[in-house]
Image (tube, rainbow, N blue to C red):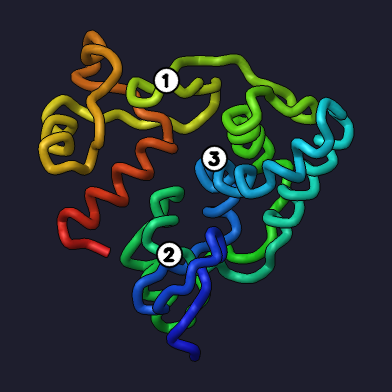
Amino acid sequence: MDKQAVCDTCNARIERAHCYCLTTTTVVLSEAYWRSQFRLATEVVRAFGGAERSQSTVFDGLIRQAAGSTTLWLICEDCSEHFAFDRAAAREHALHGTVPARSGAVDPGGCAQFAAAAWEHVFGRWPSNVQQPTVGDTCDFCAKKVYQGEFAGQLGVEVTERYLASGVLESPPLCPPRAGKGGWLSCMVCMNRVVARASRAEGGR
């Protein structure tokens, strides 16, 4: 097995010992992953100008391509901040070339909302070929819309203060702690980044 690899998200050269092995499901359910891919496709999308149908075709093509991947994804340390996963298990799979459970292609419809939220973030509007859910809340760290049914997390006051002091969190919440909650609501884009950075700060991989 080759000790060198290429990150399947950003194409950076990486040591296999320093990467993670993820399933297609884990990857395509990440809004942060879709943001990174849509930024790469910005020139292609903007070439269509205001042609909604053509942009919808680009959107559909990108999510079908990713969701249809039957192979595992090797992810670098930086890109690991996009995803929610068992870091120790993913590192072991990368090191030994073993296959995680529930690997393989997935239904692109199951990841459409995550991709659509990323499309809205990058291009400023929700794609017309995906039904837009109702906004249920907003992230207390980045002000991202949190749609009904979307995953979200909580960060308590003590944890948040510790992460700010250690640099895991780069900036404080945008508002006081929520009444009766003892902390703040975090979207999964922010939460996944915090979990990855906290793991590194604590010596985990």
Tag 2's secondary structure?
A: loop
Sequence order check, earlier mark of 3 and 2: 3
The residue under the point 65% across, 30% down is: 123
Query: CA–CA distance between discs 1 and 2?
Result: 27 Å
Residue type of the residue flagged with mark 2? Cys
Sequence order check, earlier mark of 1 and 2: 2
Query: CA–CA distance between discs 3 and 2?
Result: 17 Å
Q: Where 101 sits versus 187, above or below?
A: below
Identify the residue at the far bottom of this view. 1
Sequence order check, earlier mark of 3 and 1: 3
Could you tell me which quadrant the C terminus lies in? Answer: bottom left
Give the left or right position of residue 87, taking residue 183 as reference: right
Q: Which residue is mark 2?
A: 76
Dots 3, 2 in contact, CB < 8 A:
no
* Front residue of 144 and 182: 144
* Front residue of 146 and 9: 9
Residue type of the residue flagged with mark 1? Ala
What numbered label is drawn on residue 31?
3
Dots 3, 1 in contact, CB < 8 A:
no
x then y, percent, for residue 192: 38, 44
Q: Where 107 sits versus 133, above or below?
A: below
Q: Where 154 sits versus 13, above or below?
A: above
Crowd rating for badge 1 (residues with CA inside 10 Å; few <14, some 14–19, many 20+): some
Crowd rating for badge 2 (residues with CA inside 10 Å; few <14, some 14–19, many 20+): many
Tag 1's secondary structure?
A: loop
Give the left or right position of residue 203, taking residue 68 as reference: left
